[in-house]
Image (spheres, coloured by chain):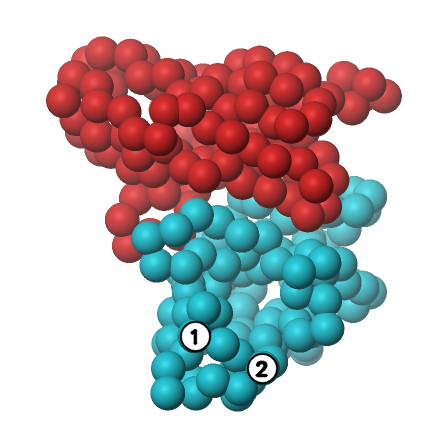
Amino acid sequence: DIVMTQSPDSLAVSLGERATINCKSSQSVLYSSNNKNYLAWYQQKPGQPPKLLIYWASTRESGVPDRFSGSGSGTDFTLTITSLQAEDVAVYYCQQYYSTPYSFGQGTKLEIK
Amino acid sequence: QVQLVQSGAEVKKPGASVKVSCKASGYTFTGYYIHWVRQAPGQGLEWMGWINPNSGGTNYAQKFQGWVTMTRDTSISTAYMELSRLRPDDTAFYYCARGPLVVVVAALGAFDIWGQGTMVTVSS
């Protein structure tokens, strides 16, 4: 099974500043046949279900603000939020869908400093 | 609009079973995989398995094999997840989520639409 590990567990960033969340997989989630990374990022606000932000490691879901971006390949990935807004306070999860059981990181709680 | 609407909260005793429903609307139900994910209070997300609503085929996480059953009723665009032999540590929110098109091999795609969640409490 692929283990997803996020860092840090929690993060406090000032409004308007950049937030960076890292995700590492225990094995590569890059399919060489199509050169795609089977990695997604989700945002979960209190009392709500998760919301898809990024898929294929760097493709933004429709309607997601462009201050959210994903990068990385193979086993190391990053979610970056430029110019943090108050509404970005949430827990963020990475997920691999390279192989079952699909697994999520433990989550990173993002707060305002 | 595209949405998944789940059944209401449940309270069950240990050893009982629970069946959660997930009704799809705004898209062709049989065209996309449905996944089930659970989240214990204050904890992270745990994938349970998927169902192909077109064929009825399923793929369960090994942890849940033998005590989870995923089914669907295409006439009412609804997927179901039944968990048996409940224990107190099964207390969690249970979410359904839409996966990729069923033509995608092995449901290898992100989850783009989520249900609102169903809280299942297991307590004596």
For the residues tagged 1 and 2, is the chain the same? yes
Q: Residue at x 72, y 58 (%)?
A: B62
**Residue A25 locus on image (x, y percent):** 61, 27
Task: Tell me how many marks there are.
Answer: 2
The numbered mark 1 sits on a residue in which chain? B
Q: Residue at x 30, y 44 (%)?
A: A45
Q: In this image, B8 relative to A45: left or right? A: right
Mark carried by residue B88: 1
**Residue B44 locus on image (x, y percent):** 43, 48
State the hue of chain A.
red
Check the image and report above or below for B103 versus B54. Answer: above
Inspect the image, locate mark 1, and give the three-letter code of the amino acid beneath it: Pro
Inspect the image, locate mark 2, and give the three-letter code of the amino acid beneath it: Arg
Mark carried by residue B3: none
Q: Residue at x 21, y 30 (%)?
A: A111
Dot 2: what SS? loop
Q: In this image, B59 relative to B22: left or right? A: right
